[in-house]
Image (tube, rainbow, N blue to C red):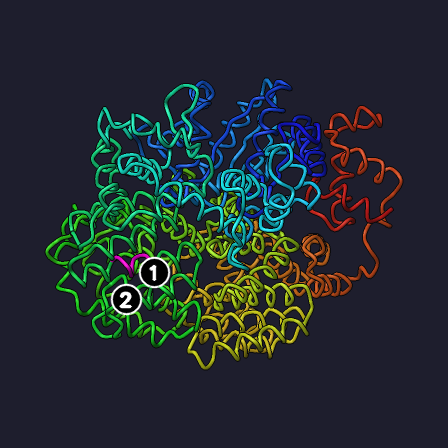
Amino acid sequence: MDVDERGLVGRAGELAALGAFLAEAAEDGAAMLLAGEPGIGKTALLDLAAERAAALGRRVVRGGGVEYETEIGFAGLHQLVGPLAAELAALPEPSRCALEVALGFGAGPTPAEMAVLHGALSLFTLAARDRPLLLVVDDLHALDRPSRSVLSFVARRAAGRRIGVLAAVRSGTAGSHGLDLPELRVLPLPDAAATRLLAERFAELPRRATATVVHQAQGNPLALLEFGALAGVSGAMRDTVPGVGPARDVRALYAARVARLPAETRDLLLLAALEGSGDLGVLEAAAGSDALDALGAAERDLLVQVTVDGRAVLFRHPLVRSAVVEGATSEQRRAAHRRLAEALIDRPERHADHLSMAIAVPDERVAQLVEDWARLTLRRGDVLGAMDRLRRAARLSPDRAVGDRRLAHAAYIGASVAGHLELSHQLMRDLRATAEAGLSLPAAAARGYRELMVEGDVATAHRILVEALAALPALGCAARPGCAARLGALPALGALPATAATDLDELSPALFTLTLVCLWAGRTELWAPLQKVVAPFPRVSASSPVSMVRILEDPGAVPDELLRDLDDQLARLAEVTDADVIIRTALAASYLDRLPGCHQLLTRAVQDARDSGTVGGALPSLVMSTLDDLYAGRWGAAQAAAAEIVSLGRDTGYHLFSHIGRYIVALLAAQRGDSATCAAESRILLDWAGPRGLGRLTRWAHQALARDALGASDFETAYRHATAITAPGELPPFNLEALWTALDLAEAALRTGRADAARAHAAAMRATGAARVSPRFGLITAAMTALTSPPAETARHFDAALALPGAEQWPFELARAELAYGEQLRRQSLKAEARVRLAAARDRFERLGATPWVRRATSELRATGRERRPGEALTPQEREVAELAAAGLTTKEIAARLLLSPRTVSAHLYRIFPKLGISSRAALRDALGRDR
């Protein structure tokens, strides 16, 4: 690339950087941002890069942000997808449909945000299959939010796909564009280069005038050219206002030139500026068939240009567009929006946007139209876009209460879905109905959610929500099958019709928030108002707030029908579009030990939120994926994620989430034997939860402390903490922790001489019926039953526990059951059998890193008379048999290899397993490895 290519003077460094970028993008894939002030030359550099790439045989697709289209979802993505119609048609149906529906090309269920992101990535990857693809995007800061998310997603995954992403962003918009990518700063030209540029463009300009222009333009190329042209005409330059800056001065020059245009030309330019895409067909429909002739005056003044194909008009620079809009009166702008709305009647979304900006007084018909599109925008995954539209709908609402409802709805989704507490708080401040009494359901849901997540104030949150629900008419529709079916199908923020009793669309967020409040308060009596509200509803979807209340009341009583429904929902979760429904489905799964069914979707949502810089909204997903890592024995991953939860919760203001992270840290520390960390984190939990009445968080602290004490064989302390969660023989409703720690309490009771308490607790656990819900509850129930049964029945119950299908998903619980089994066998003087179970437990604990539990198992092994590691007692032939079996050979193959009978090999294996302290061939390799 030449320094002087296309007249780009003084840009040798930028041109070299772009050359290197283009080479890397074509070879592997790369992304880069050009950043600089308006007029600094970013667009010229983009043009040059695009031309250079095209000349080298690469495919180039261009797009750009339009200041007055920032609220139109996927407007920017339209520009990038449009030239790839053939590739779009060739995409697999799920990806193609997701893109077509999101962009308005097709009809169908609203796609999830992740489906759109992955669909776009698949499209661009396909487009780059035969030759490298370069995506060029100007004015990134003015791009609509969902399109920026797509661009961010693609840019971070460009490597290995031969996709280049080159975008320009205005200085001063740092952080607003959401793309944390390598950045090339485009700086003002040095005086020498500026003088050279003027000399090339305006050879007749006097030296004194040149010096004045260079001084006033401050190295801004656009200002140099505009000031130079003005000086060439007038012969002089009057001083500009000090400190205003060249871009502002150029805008003023453009404004003066626009003002001199004929009125009909200004009207047409205003339509073009507000329409955004420059589509001449739309402009003709809005202004009339003869109106396009008025463009001539603006073309001759070099303010606009018509594309080669004659289909669109482009502004010379975004500052021209700004000058056109700012030079129009508010009535002129409204009139232009009105004409555009009429011209776009066949494009409902854009029609609604222009119509909403065309009226000066509240209008419920338009407000409802904008709200409807806000809901569709939300289902597309553009939460912030939905909030913007809800705010606009609120401003257009003639009825104050309806407007406040819309504003409160925006505040709720801002806090609970988007993870933008500050924006949600601002919306709540904007509510005209600021008194707590009489809050609408959405306002109560938003306020209650903030009180819970930010302050941990369950008392205030509970009062606000209960008062709002109590103010509703009787929930007459709840008993009608149609209403219940709709609540089950769209239990979040779907378009549910209002009834004479209440609007289920409003009811769902309030019910869900009150459910969370009651759960974290941890007091049974607080559930009564909520139970009264949900009682009239028949069985509905497992992810609905109604079902969630019933699940939490008594997990063991959940009917098989509801369990099957939840399993079906988890199988289809990747198809769900509503973020609220995804979170509630995952929560229901967590209460019923089905988190593995949504782990992949949760981790993908978290990773994509990290990529787009909106991880605050993904905190619930991060918490649940971390808990799944904890339960599945992926303790390293859980530790790192828990630390991130603590940090993110603190940084974003979601303090309850931060303390959930501390609980995971405390429990991991307990199970790993880090008593100091467990005690410190548990103390923080107790100190924060106690004054706020967060009973569940208090119980979590006691769970961690009980687990730590059990690992250290301090059974009296373990009993004290376990009974702080629930009394022996009692498993109260709405107390999941009582189920989780039932084995802790039973074991501690037995080891402290409280056998009657242990038996009562085991009986209570069996009575709940929880064993049928999940392998973990089945393991816990069977182990408790075995521990408290007569010696003759112990083995039968333990064998049943260890044979449970799916038990391997809960490695810590499974290891505890094997440890308890081995301890019981040893106490019955069945030492050989005990060694097998104890060694298996020790191996599992070692793989987990559960150091204190390894010590417990090792101590029990020593008590069986085996103080040294097993394996030393193997005879040479036994070792040979063991090594061949560990290598995967069958009994017959080993017999043939060693010239033995299969029966002899089987006898050797029968003796080998107890000697090595294992119970299956699968453990042979590890056992032999330890012995080397």
Looking at the image, tell me whether mark 2 or mark 1 is earlier in sequence order: 1
Quadrant housing the N terminus: top right
Q: Amino acid at mark 2?
A: Leu
Location of residue 810 in the rendering, given as x and y in whole percent from the top left corner:
56, 52
Location of residue 312 in the rendering, given as x and y in whole percent from the top left corner:
38, 26
Residue at 58% of width from left, 52% of height from top? 629
Asked whether the viewer can see residue 771, the reply is: yes
Secondary structure mainly formed by the magenta segment: helix
Position of residue 218 relative to residue 751, above or below, is above
- The residue wearing badge 2 is 431
Residue sticking out furthest to the right: 876
Q: Is residue 284 left or right of residue 302?
A: left
Residue sticking out furthest to the bottom: 691
Q: Is residue 364 left or right of residue 628?
A: left
Q: Give the total of numbered labels.
A: 2
Position of residue 754 relative to residue 156, above or below, is below
